[in-house]
Structure formats: structure tokens, C-alpha cells
Amino acid sequence: MSRIAGALRRTFGIVRNHVGTDHLGNKYYIVPEQKTWTGRLVRAKRMVVAANPTEYEYIEGSIPIEWDAWIRGRRKEPPSVEELLKNETYREQIKVKAKEVEEKELALQAKEYEEGLVATPAKTLAKGHAAATSFGKEEISEDPTSTANTFQPGSWMPGPKK
């Protein structure tokens, strides 16, 4: 059955060669340069058949970086399994090192605040834009300011219409 389907595909459709499959289940194909039954030359193409074909369920990282580079023609050869594993462990090592550096930086920053070497960041009290005439001034609001715990029905009345 597959021989008949292959013959029909070669006669009427596109021949595609399976190049590889990634760990997410996406399948990668190359369509070699070929002539159609009308004699028109079709140049070589690279394509992916997604494991999750619905467009709205696409998430970032659905195609590994190495395979994406191959699909877009940035590399000639498809990635090997060894290369994919090596790059994945490298990315994990970089994440661990970045987390360590961030923790050291936070510890150093806390120590500097503690020793008084660096002033603690000031909290901004002024609301609005510095160019506004009311910048830094306390505004009186007609909106109720009570919280749910202290709210009393009928304690606030709307102001007059302007």
C-alpha cells in the first residue's frame, strides 16, 4: 500500500524525506528539488509537522532552537541527537550559574545596605508626572477612601455635579 501511495505522491504531489524528530514529537522533513508532472521545477524546502498542530495552542519553545535554525536555512545539516543533548545541558548550566550570580548579588546588596555603604532605595510618595502642576502635592479626592473593614453604609455622599 505504501508503495502505491508513494508512486501516486511522486506522480501528483510532493515527495518529502523525513530528516528527524525532536523530543517534543515534531517531525522535520526536507522536500528535495524536483519537477512536477507539468515540468515546473520546485526548489528544495524544509518543513515541520508539529506534534500539536492547533495554532492557538502554540507555546514558545515548541520547536527547539537548533531545529528552528535548520528550518530557516541558517544551518546546512539538521542537528544530531548528541548536539541537542549537549546544548540542553549547557543551557541548564547557564541557568544555574545565573541563579547563583543573582543570589550573590542580592546578598552583597543586602550587606551593603546593612553596613550603610549604600543608601536604601527611597519609596516614591509623589504620584503623577513631574511636569504636572500638582506633582508632589496632596490631592483631595471625592472618592471614598474607606476600606471594606471600616466602610459604613451611607457614610459617603457624592459631591455636586460639575
Image (cartoon, rainbow, N blue to C red):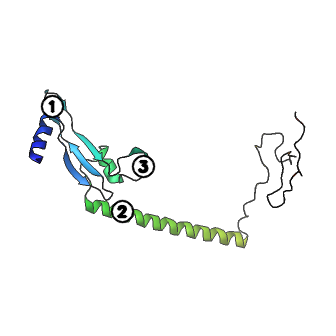
How crowded is the residue under tag 3: few (<14 C-alpha within 10 Å), some, or many (20+)? few
How crowded is the residue under tag 1: few (<14 C-alpha within 10 Å), some, or many (20+)? some
Q: Nearer the viewer, residue 1 or 99?
A: 1
What number is the disc on residue 36? 1
Of the image marks 3 and 1, the number of the one nearer the N terminus: 1
**Residue type, numbered disc 2:** Glu
Q: Secondary structure at mark 1?
A: loop
User: Which quadrant, please, contains the C terminus?
Assistant: top right
Q: Position of residue 19 (x, y in %)?
A: 21, 51
Q: Secondary structure at mark 3?
A: helix
In-image side of 55 versus 34 (left or right): right
Which circle, 2 or 3, is nearer the viewer? 3
Which circle, 3 or 1, is nearer the viewer? 3
What number is the disc on residue 88? 2
Q: CA distance from mark 2 to mark 3?
A: 23 Å
* Residue found at x 12% / y 47%: 2
Residue 88: quarter of image: bottom left
Of the image marks 2 and 3, the number of the one nearer the N terminus: 3
Of the image marks 1 and 2, the number of the one nearer the N terminus: 1
**Residue type, numbered disc 1:** Thr
Which circle, 1 or 2, is nearer the viewer? 1
In-image side of 89 versus 34 (left or right): right
In the picture shown, does residue 149 fall above or below 59? below
Q: CA distance from mark 1 to mark 2?
A: 40 Å
Q: Position of residue 80 (x, y in %)?
A: 25, 58
How crowded is the residue under tag 2: few (<14 C-alpha within 10 Å), some, or many (20+)? few
In-image side of 105 versus 6 (left or right): right
Q: Position of residue 68 (x, y in %)?
A: 33, 48
What number is the disc on residue 23? none
- Residue 71 in view: yes
Q: CA distance from mark 3 to mark 1?
A: 34 Å
